[in-house]
Image (cartoon, grey):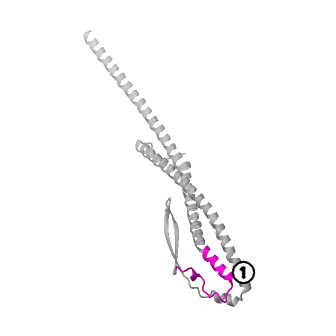
């Protein structure tokens, strides 16, 4: 329903038509954005599912190796072997814009390019299972980082999809119908005012014609009286 206090003027009619055109164009753009966001979101969900499965399998392998290593090594020796790591990691974060959503991008680099730096202990007094566990954790680290990146991107895109969906619904079910109703109401009132003005002008014209005819009759009557 249109607002009761809407001004039935041509300026207001032009304003509402302009607002309707802008809202319709914005509605189309937001729908296109929502559809593209949904497409990319679903692609990310599929990638996230596959990567999560890969990470879980890698962590299970590492956990199994650590379990075996802890069984064949004393807890003190295991703790001492991993107490002072040799390798360090630098983590950097940047942002990538996906359909006006700034999603984080994680990049990491190791202090040393030597692959053997991941083992902070000597191989003589440790179990081979511990080597496998450390290697499995090192291999899964990059996938874990990528998984965190994708899951955060999915969260941000889901929030943006929800906001875009609410805006689309607001335009489709509130703003556009309200503008259409106002345009219809104003047009009807303007047409009614125009008809009333036309009728008023016709009545004034009839009154003026009647007055003119009456005046001519009086003048004719006076002229006839003068000739008698």
Name of the residue lying farthest toward the right: 71
Q: Nearer the viewer, residue 141 or 197?
A: 141
**To which quarter of the image does residue 56 belong?**
bottom right
Residue 79 x %, y %: 66, 88
Q: Residue at x 63, y 78 (%)?
A: 135
Residue 57 x %, y %: 68, 70
Name of the residue lying farthest toward the left: 227
Image side of residue 19 versus residue 152, left or right: left
**To which quarter of the image does residue 116 belong?**
bottom right
**The N terminus - image quarter:** top right
Magenta stretch, residue numbers: 113-139
Q: Is residue 51 visible?
A: yes
In reply to whether residue 135 is colored magenta, the answer given is yes
- Please determine whether, in this image, residue 63 is positioned above or below residue 163: below
Q: Secondary structure at mark 1?
A: helix
Report the label total. 1
Image side of residue 150 versus residue 224, left or right: right
In reply to whether residue 144 is colored magenta, the answer given is no
**To which quarter of the image does residue 82 belong?**
bottom right
- Please determine whether, in this image, residue 75 is positioned above or below residue 92: below
Residue 217 x %, y %: 32, 17
- Please determine whether, in this image, residue 61 is positioned above or below residue 77: above
Label 1 packing within 10 angstroms: few (<14), some (14-19), many (20+): some
Residue identified by numbered label 1: 67
Q: Nearer the viewer, residue 14 or 228?
A: 14
**The C terminus - image quarter:** top left
Residue 194 x %, y %: 42, 34
- Please determine whether, in this image, residue 228 is positioned above or below residue 26: above
């Amino acid at each position: 329903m249109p607002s009761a206090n809407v001004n039935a003027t041509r300026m207001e009619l032009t304003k509402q038509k302009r607002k309707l055109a802008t809202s319709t164009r914005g509605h189309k753009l937001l729908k296109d954005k929502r559809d593209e966001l949904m497409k990319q979101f679903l692609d990310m969900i599929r990638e996230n599912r596959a990567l999560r499965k890969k990470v879980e399998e890698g962590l299970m392998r590492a956990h199994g190796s650590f379990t075996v290593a802890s069984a064949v090594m004393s807890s003190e020796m295991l703790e001492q072997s991993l107490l002072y790591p040799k390798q360090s990691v630098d983590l950097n974060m940047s942002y990538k814009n996906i359909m006006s959503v700034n999603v984080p991008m994680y990049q990491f680099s190791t202090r040393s390019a030597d692959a053997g730096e991941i083992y902070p202990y000597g191989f003589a007094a440790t179990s081979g299972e511990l080597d496998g566990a450390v290697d499995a954790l090192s291999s899964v680290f990059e996938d874990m980082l990528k998984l965190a990146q994708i899951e955060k991107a999915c969260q941000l895109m889901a929030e943006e999809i929800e906001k875009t969906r609410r805006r689309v619904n607001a335009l489709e079910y509130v703003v556009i119908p309200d503008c259409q109703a106002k345009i219809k109401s104003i047009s009807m009132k303007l047409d009614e005012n125009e008809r009333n003005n036309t009728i008023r002008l016709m009545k004034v014209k009839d009154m003026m014609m009647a007055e003119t005819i009456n005046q001519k009759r009086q003048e004719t009557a006076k002229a006839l009286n003068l000739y008698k």
